[in-house]
Image: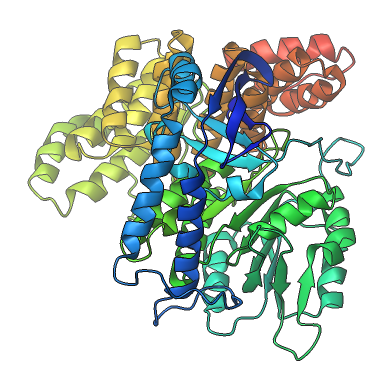
Amino acid sequence: MSSKSIILVLASGTLGNGFSHVTAELRESEKTLIKFSGSLPPAPEIGLLHDKWKMMCNVLKPRSYDPRIKVKSTGVTNISEDKPEAVYRNLQEHMKKWLEADEFCRKIESKLRTHIGNVSECFKIFLEVDQPEIWELPWDAWAFREDYANCEIIPTSSQYGKKNQEKTAAEIALPSQGRILCVAGNSKGINIEEDKRIIQQRLGDRCDLQFLKEPTPQELHDELFDDKGWQVFFFAGHSNSDNNAANGVLYINQKPDRNSIKVEELKAGLKKAISKGLQLLIFNSCSSLGIATDIVAEGLDLPSIIVMRAPLPDVVANEFVKYLFTYLAAGELLFLAVRKAKNDLQKWDSQFPGASGIPMLCQHPTFEEFVLPQPEADRPSAPETDAVTVDRHPSYPQFTIPTKLMQRTSISLAVFAIGYPLIGPNLASAINTFGMKNHRSNQFLIAKASYNIASSINPTNGEFFYNLSLLCDQLNEDECAQDSMQQAVWRGLPEAYAQISKSLILKNKPEAALKVIGMCLEQTQFDGVKSSCFKNRGWVRFNQNQYDSAAADLRIAISLNSETPEAQCLLAKVLEAQGKPQEALIHWEETLKSAKSSIPKQDECIQLAKQRLPKTGQTK
């Protein structure tokens, strides 16, 4: 997870009177780096404009789209219906001007910019204030947030602890991991089935999905008490809350009575689910901010909650679900998945002013990082170190070519294939396969010739260069290894990014390594490759003494590929650095199970593990 965070505290105050004491605390790995204080002036006009915008959302509903809410009539009819975008633009401009006030901008924002520096830095901004009406404001308009694309503003209350989850004896979370309870409530006028289709499409291959349609309060209560627990609770349907973003109500069915439920009625079930490992609540229903504030008021140990701070058209609600789960399925951190999903919603802002800013992530700074299970790898993992690559199950025909014939006719084959584009790719792949077979048999000369021929026949395939690089590395031909791996990178082969990032770490170039790792995680679809890249990022963070971040990345790497001895070894080192030697022993044992002494880096880990586990038998 990201190790940096900002705690922005708005102490006692109101929009009408201003906030005389505002503090900003910059943290890294839960340690305070620096703290600033300033203030914000009175801005009563922001409250008035925000109320006007919310009324606009309620009254100016597009005829073709119902919002996910049943709104009590307010009697308001004096909103300009022909220029709703002007209302929101005016609100944004006032919000920006308020946050540009000298006592805030000079004393807090400018100092934060100095200490954070790089605009690509990844961090969270916790907005700590006990007034839901301040949470509701369009903080997305803050220029600081706009300039830092990898941050998100997360409302939180001033009182929080660390939620107490049940654990197994090995300190592993109970089987709630990957279990998602999807509740379809009152769906009159909205398309909840689209939410279901999206969730099944994005997460059906890795999660245990349970769909509960229009339950009674008792049925919902029973599901929350499920023995295995749930990692995610997702609700889609109608909801409502009062004008102060409190007293939230979920409309769970369309029956004449017992068709709604309040948080106080869910308290026991939610408390049980949280203790079993509930990490994320998603209320894809409009004006559901009141649900979050009610959960805080009930004194529950707050997990992460995604809510809507205003009515949201159904089509936009569907889009948000699609974007959110797409990013989460790709392994994105929760706060970045929310940020990116909101960015993708900006295309709707011209039609529904302010729509992209309606979803909100509420969270406490003590939250546990949310990670979805990953599907089984579709192909072998990228090598951890000097290991030889293995077959990638080509879809083309495989040919058996005798060694002597290969050596005598290699040049003529290349010329022939280049002249015949339809034959060339298949032949190049067959020659590459032949090279891999000889590589495994330690016939290095034939293997090297084969990789060179394959890359000459089809120079656009990065896999051939990648295999050649691994061979050259094994033969200690550094120039050949680096050049070939760079060729693979240029051709977009994700495995190459994993290897290049490792090389950069060894050369003590962490920033360059992180950039390559970022490209790796963006481009690869394979769990094995992701595992190597997460492992490398955890390695960088460990070297930077960012232990929380390192541990999170290494756990992801292990979840993607359980047989990754270097990640197990690194995680054991991280846990020791965090003062958790007993937990580290588990990972030293796992290191010994799959590490190979023939690989220098893994042999290093083997020796360390044996020091910690003197009675452990020999490894392979």
Identify the coloring.
rainbow
x, y percent for residue 417: 14, 45
Q: With 148 as the anchor, is 237 left or right in this view?
A: right
Q: Position of residue 246 (x, y in %)?
A: 71, 59
Q: In the depicted view, which residue is nearer to us: 383 or 271?
A: 271
Above or below: residue 552 compared with residue 193:
above
Q: x%, y% of residue 449?
A: 27, 26
Residue at the (56%, 76%) spot, across then down: 192
Residue ID at (35%, 64%): 84
Counting every numbered tag in the picture gives 0
- Tell me the residue at 43%/42% (across/down): 95
Residue 30 higher or lower than 138, as above or below: above
Q: Is residue 432 left or right of residue 152?
A: left
At x 59% / y 52%, what residue is drawn?
Answer: 375
Q: Is residue 249 above or below residue 620?
A: below
Residue 369 seen by the camera: yes
Is residue 380 among the parts visible in the rendering? no
Q: How far across and down, in percent of the image, does residue 105 sit? A: 44, 23
| Rendered-image quadrant of the C terminus | top right
Query: Closest to the observer: 462 or 364?
Result: 364
| Residue 543 or residue 418, whichever sits in front | 543
Q: Is residue 16 left or right of residue 156?
A: left
Q: Where is the N terminus found, in terms of image quarters?
A: top right
